[in-house]
Structures are given as C-alpha cells and as structure tokens.
Amino acid sequence: MKTTDTTDPARLGAYVLPGRVQDPRPAVGEARTAEHLGLGSVWISERWGTKDLAVLAGAIGQATDTIRIASGITHFLVRHPAVLASTAMTLQALTGGRFTLGVGRSTDALWKAAGLPRMSNAVLTDSVDMFRRLCRGERVSYDGPAGRFPHLRLGDLPSDVPVPPVLLAAIGPKTLALAGRHFDGAILHPFLTPEAVARSAALVRKAAEEAGRDPASVRIHAEVVTAPDLTEDEENAVVGARAVTYFQIPFFGETLAGANGWDTAELEKLRTHPKLAGLRGAADNRFTRHELLDVVGSLPPEWLATASAAGPAAACADRLRSYLDAGADELILHGSTPDLLGPLLQHFTAAD
C-alpha cells in the first residue's frame, strides 16, 4: 500500500552483507536485526562465491517472519529461466510471499566473458515475460535474443502465493522508461542526489502512464549509501570508497555523474590515481574498502556530501526524508549493516 508517511520505518530497507565478504553467515543475524528495528525489507546484493541469492534468501526467510526479502540485484540468464522461476516460487512458498526479484543490466564485457547474451532491452523484456508466465504455470516456447527454449513449464507450483514483483535497476532514461513500461518498479542507483531521484521517478511514472499503466503501481526504490555516527575513516570507507568503485568504471561513471548533472571531466582525476591507473573492472574486485581510502580524495567532496546520507544520525534521517519527498516510495540503505542503524531510526521515526 502506498504511503506518504516520511516517518514510517517500513519504507526503509537495508542490505545484508554490504560489499565484499568471505563469510555469509552474518546475513541471518543482520536480517533479524532489520526486522526487529521495523524495517520493511532486506536486500541481497548477489556476488558469486559467497553471496548466492537463493541460499541467502532461503536462510533469511526461515529466520524472519514479516520482513520482505529482495535481490538487489541479480541478472536474468545467469540462471536458466525455469530455474530462476522455480527459485522464486519456492522462496514465495517458504516465506509466505515475501520475495521480490530485482534484476539489472550490468555490462557487455561481463556477459561476453560469461558466454551469455548481452543484456539488451529485448532480452530484459522477453526475460521478464518468460519469468512471469512460468511463475503462473504457463507453458513457454521461446526463440529469440534471450536464447532458445523450446518447451518450458514448472511441474508444480505452490498455492496461494503471488508471482513475485520484478524490479529493474536503472540509471539512464531509456532503462528508466523500460522499468515504467514493463516492470513492477525501478531500483535507482546509489549516489543520486534527491533532485536526480525526482527526475528519475518522473521518467519512470511518465513511461508507465504512456503504456496505459497506473503510475502509482510502479514502485520507486532509491538506494542511499548511509553512514550515521561513524568516525571519519569509517565514513570514508562506507561512502567514499563505495563511490570510488562506481565512478571509476568507464561509461558507468559518466552515466551516473551525468544523471546528477555533474561535470564528467572530474572522473579523469579519479581514474589516473596511481592505484587505479590501468585497472580493469571494478576497484572493489581488487581492493578492500579500507585500501581505497587514499583514493577518495580524487572525487569532488560535494559529490559525496550531496548524494549520500552521512554524519550525525539526525542529519542522516533528514536526508532520507528528502529522498522520500523527492518521489521515492521506498529507500534501500546501503553501506551500513542494520546493527548500525538504530539511532538513525529513532530520529527518522520521531514526529516532525
């Protein structure tokens, strides 16, 4: 149900296991803490090796009772369409319908290396259609850009659980419009300012309306890197180092900076830092967040200050409300685990 209450903790979600991890077991305790705090959702950022979506979502589903569980994000075609639909419906049965599937586009280089089709708009729309049809128990025969699947159908389906909502991670205007036309919602990338969130939400809702859909039915989930009451080094590790990993990626950094109306020429200083020069792929595949602290100063300070929620907990709560006021239906708090969010939530839920 849509709400305009900017003090409702159910409009906030949090990542479990943010960033790189070698031990996935804390995810269960983090999810329990999030539920105890009254958060509406927990999010799993899939990373091959220790953060498998299906395993973590299943474990969290059995350790919690009410909190929604979402992928933020996985990708179509890394699992066979029937396997993905089966995973989703099994999770729905285990959790009483609490699962949400968040998917993204990623980069052509990743799909080439993995031997999978590039994630074009046609692949995204065809894949979400196949997913929903399989979850409804329909037969699917498909031959197109997403692959060739002559005859697919799930043999058994749980009763009395819905097809999971499917969200699309989006930054650029074309992908935002795609989310509005074909998906149940959009996931907006971290390090967008509230003004950029407002523009993005408007694009999604306009596309939904033009497609004959109710714009209010397409949910806007904005990710906000959040670092309340941390030391300077820890805040830089949570906010600054995470920003480095996004902005240093060619084309992706330009897209993200452009969405905020920032000067993309600033990215050259970041990418020519001795630690990043010549680096291929994402920086966090090579370095830990603390190893990137000396690179943070290569980014304009105002980028970090205006596109995250950091500092005293009360100020973080005010910043989160500004994102909700900008048009986000829900926020996904990134960077800080749920056990660090208690004081922030006390300020967030306080009456104005």
Image (cartoon, grey):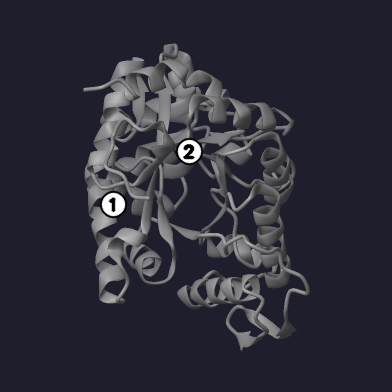
| 290 in relation to 75, above or below | above
Q: Residue at x 28, y 52 (%)?
A: 258
Q: Position of residue 163 (x, y in %)?
A: 57, 64
Residue projecting furthest to the right: 155
- Asked if residue 190 lies left or right of residue 117, the reply is left
Badge 2 crowding class, 10 Å Cα cut-off, few under 14, some 14 to 19, many 20 or more, is many
- Asked if residue 155 lies left or right of residue 61, the reply is right
Q: Helix or strand or loop: what does disc 2 sit on?
A: loop
Q: Is residue 300 visible?
A: no
The one nearer the camera, 111 or 67, is 67
Q: Which residue is mark 1?
A: 259
Q: Which residue is mark 2?
A: 40
Q: Residue at x 27, y 42 (%)?
A: 4
Q: Position of residue 180 (x, y in %)?
A: 35, 66
| 310 in relation to 47, above or below | above
The one nearer the camera, 2 or 185, is 2
Q: Helix or strand or loop: what does disc 1 sit on?
A: helix
Q: Residue at x 56, y 60 (%)?
A: 164
Q: Amino acid at mark 2?
A: Gly
Q: Position of residue 110 (x, y in %)?
A: 61, 60
Badge 1 crowding class, 10 Å Cα cut-off, few under 14, some 14 to 19, many 20 or more, is many
Q: Residue at x 28, y 55 (%)?
A: 200
Q: Amino acid at mark 1?
A: Ala
The one nearer the camera, 217 or 124, is 217
**Quarter of image, res 76:** bottom right
Query: Residue 199, labelled with which disc?
Result: none
Q: Could you tell me how far apart the alpha carbons at marks 2 and 1 are, in whole angstroms?
A: 27 Å
Q: Nearer the viewer, mark 2 or mark 1?
A: 2
- Asked if residue 148 lies left or right of residue 202, the reply is right
Q: Position of residue 226 (x, y in %)?
A: 41, 28
| 67 in relation to 317, above or below | below
Q: Are marks 2 and 1 in contact (CB under 8 Å)?
A: no
